[in-house]
Amino acid sequence: QVQLVESGGGSVQAGGSLRLSCVASGYTYSMGWFRQTPGKEREGVAVIYGRSSSTVYDDSVKGRFTISQDNAKRTVYLQMTSLKPEDTAMYYCAAAVNSRSDILNPLAYNYWGQGTQVTVSS
């Protein structure tokens, strides 16, 4: 059983920064951040492997977002910089308990947080 609680969303101007946090309980093989806007499919943003700390990013955020973790605190972070209006979405933390072939695919994840809204204005 995995429980996830994310926080850190808010409203910022384009070019600004924001850091999201996700605290996990229970075993997690990998953890990631996903986002969704109304009427659209949920998409992967960034994932980090628990043991190796290897990371995977969607092309849309490479060079702007950084995912990291503090294993002692069981917390994963998403540092977002150079934010764009198109980054506006509900951001969800997710956890997988087993290896998956497509680590950025939302269908690979078993547990989800409640979501935190990120709004970027022009």
Image (cartoon, rainbow, N blue to C red):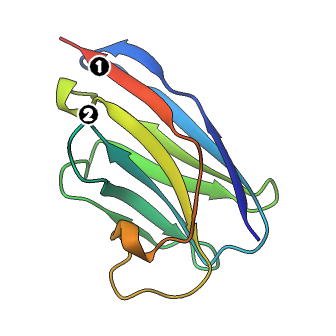
Of the pair 32 and 41, the residue shown nearer to us: 41
Give the structural element (helix, strand or loop) at label 1.
strand
x, y (%) of residue 88? 28, 29
Give the structural element (helix, strand or loop) at label 2.
helix
State which quarter of the image contains the C terminus: top left
Looking at the picture, which amino acid does disc 1 mark?
Val
Q: Name which residue lies at 77% across and 71% down.
A: 1
The quarter holding residue 26 reads bottom right
First reached walking from the N terminus: tag 1 or tag 2:
2
Looking at the picture, which amino acid does disc 2 mark?
Asp
Q: Could you tell me how far apart the alpha carbons at marks 1 and 2 are, in whole angstroms? A: 7 Å
x, y (%) of residue 61? 25, 48
Of the pair 30 and 35, the residue shown nearer to us: 35
Q: Is residue 111 left or right of residue 102?
A: right
Mark 2 lies on residue: 87
The answer to the question of whether label 1 and label 2 lie on touching residues, with beta carbons closer than 8 A, is: yes
Label disc, if present, on residue 120 of the rendered structure: 1
Q: Name which residue lies at 43% across and 41% down.
A: 91
Position of residue 78 relative to residue 50, above or below, is above
Q: Name which residue lies at 33% across and 71% down.
A: 105
Of the pair 120 and 94, the residue shown nearer to us: 94
The quarter holding residue 59 reads bottom left
Q: Name which residue lies at 24% across and 17% down.
A: 14
